[in-house]
Image: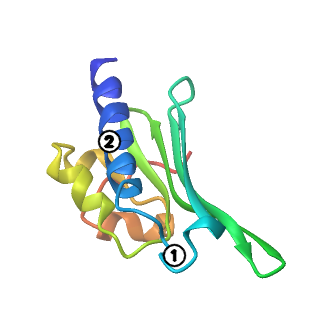
Amino acid sequence: MEKIQKYQRIIKEVLTNYNAQGPIDPVHPERREIRLVFDDEHARYQLLRLGWRGIHNYFAVIFHFEIMDEKIWVQRNMSDYDIVGEIEDKGVPKEDIVLAFLAPETWQHSGYAAPAYP
C-alpha cells in the first residue's frame, strides 16, 4: 500500500508540474485550458485539454495513468514532453512502468515492464 501511495503522489506531482508550465496556447489562453483529474480511489489520473477552435469544441486526453498490480500504466501520452522520464527521475524503476499506449507485443522490447495484458 505504501508503494501505491508513493506512485499516486509522484503521478499527481508530475501532472501538476506539467500543468504549471502555463497555457498550451499563449495566443488564446482563454479559449483552451488544461484540467487535472485525480481519482485516488480507482488509481486513475488524467490531464485533459479542452476549449474551442472557432465554433468546434475541443477535448483531448493528453496523459492518462493508472496504477494496477503496483505498476504505473501509462495508458496515453499525447505530448512530446518526457513525462515518463520525469517519473523515473522521481524514483520509479522502469520495471514498474508499463508503456500501455504501445502495442502489448512490443512491451518486452521497450525496456520497461511487460506484464500479462489484463
For the residues labelled 1 and 2, the Cα–Cα distance comes to 22 Å
Q: Are marks 1 and 2 in contact (CB under 8 Å)?
A: no
Residue drawn at (69%, 66%) of the image: 51
Picture coordinates of residue 86, whole percent (x, y)? 23, 56
> Is residue 28 in view from this perspective?
yes
> Hey, what amino acid is under mark 2?
Glu
Tell me the element at label 1: loop
Viewer-proximal residue among 39 and 53? 53
**Which tag, 1 or 2, sits closer to the chain's start?**
2
Classify residue 84 by image quadrant.
bottom left
Q: For mark 2, what is the residue?
A: 13
Residue drawn at (55%, 69%) of the image: 29
Classify residue 112 by image quadrant.
bottom left
Viewer-proximal residue among 74 and 105? 74
Q: How many badges with numbers are in the image?
A: 2
Q: Nearer the viewer, mark 1 or mark 2?
A: 1
Q: For mark 1, what is the residue?
A: 25
**Above or below — where is 30 with respect to 71?**
below
Picture coordinates of residue 66, whole percent (x, y)? 49, 42
In the rendered image, which quarter contains the C terminus?
top right
Tell me the element at label 2: helix
Outermost residue toward the top? 1
In the rendered image, which quarter contains the N terminus?
top left
Residue drawn at (78%, 82%) of the image: 54
